[in-house]
Amino acid sequence: MITNVGVIGTGFIGPAHVEALRRTGRVNVTAIADINEEIACAKAAELGILKAYGDYHGLLADPEIEVVHICTPNYLHYAMSKESLLACKHVICEKPFVFTETEGEELVALAKEKGLLGAIHLSIRFYPMVHQAREMVRRGDVGEIFAVNGSYQQDWLFYDTDYSWRLEPSLGGDSRVIADIGSHWFDTVEFITGQRVNRVLADFATFHKTRKKSLKPVETYSGKLLKPEDYAEVPITTEDYATVLLRFNGGGHGSFTGNQVAAGRKNRMAFEIYGSKCSLWYDSERPNELWIGHRDRPNEWLLKDPSLVYPEARAIISYPGGHNEGYPDTTKQMLIKVYDYLQAGGSASGTTPEFAVFEDGLRELQLCNAIVRSAQSESWVDI
């Protein structure tokens, strides 16, 4: 039985994993690590975690730790995942997976060689209404899929004074919008439809050619205007915006737009699936609703309610109808599936995991790379 888990990373997503892990009721969060021991100790005290490491190698050497959650900037994913597997720990890694396909292929092979689980935190699959949409497609309710359209829009990088490590290719990778948020959209759409994108035509734009990187702690200037001496002008090479035309291997067509300078859109992932029988529309800022469109009768709003959805969606609902569930619940539901899978024997159990694994992370990397090549060449690229 898996009992003890360690988390590497103390930023936004690390504590989010800790909270979700505790809500699964299946494991103990035994340790947390950061590159700064003082920060690690402070976060461990805040979260009630007994062990804190200022160097993640200490966590990997801890014989009690059986599973490692990697919640760090992208450039660390490959090394940390590889070292965790070599230390005989199962791995749950944040997305995007790694920087290169060679790294991804190596980690896929290493996890298989060691008989260990490598999972990717692509949690949008685990909104109940996303599962409901998937079942409606699988059961034939939607019919033949003609088209899939959608977007992922955010405004957290709207101003040129907005800055994050994600803007720096050495830390976040050569793609930002597609790799960071597009990966969620493509994984979700392929999960629902059962089809894969096999041809892309992309257009990228960087609206802020330079950004102002604060030279002092951001908190110091929260709500204040920066003075020229307080920041450095940094050139930006990753995309603020991307639109991609899509072809699917099942014959469907589609489009996706990602935008991180979309004023008013806080974190909106949306998709529309148009089939020969009906249409589906979903908006993650209204996560407990699924719109069903018809030609010859009134359209429907299906609200999240265990009594109204298919069993596969009901299985990841924790509360009665009218009691909303959102983003934190997706990670909880994903990790329930992960740890039930491990405790049933993992790959030896003969079951196919519903959650994303390293192979899915590699798939998203290959798709992202194809989209980047398309934007650079201004031409269709086959996958």
Image (cartoon, rainbow, N blue to C red):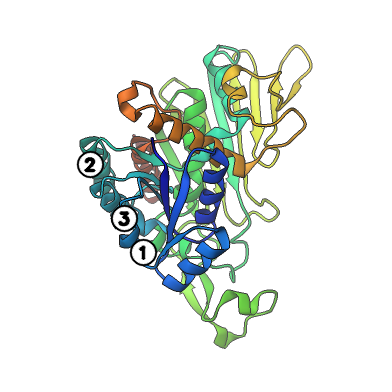
Check the image and report above or below for 323 versus 308: below
Say whether marks 1 and 2 touch (CB < 8 Å). Answer: no
Disc 3 marks which residue?
Answer: 60
Q: Residue at x 73, y 28 (%)?
A: 320
Q: Position of residue 370 (x, y in %)?
A: 36, 42
Identify residue type, mark 2: Leu
> Residue under circle 2?
110
Q: Which residue is mark 1?
A: 170
Which comes before the other along the chain, label 3 or label 2?
3
- The residue most toward the left is 113
- Where is residue 50 drawn, in percent x and y? 47, 59
Task: Name above or below for residue 166 compared with residue 242.
Answer: below
Residue 121 in percent (x, y) is at 46, 43
At 54% across and 41% down in the image, what residue appears?
331
Residue sitting at x 30%, y 61%: 57
Looking at the picture, tell me which residue is in the foreground, 375 or 102. 102
Other residues around mark 3 within 10 Å, as few (<14) / some (14–19) / many (≥20): many
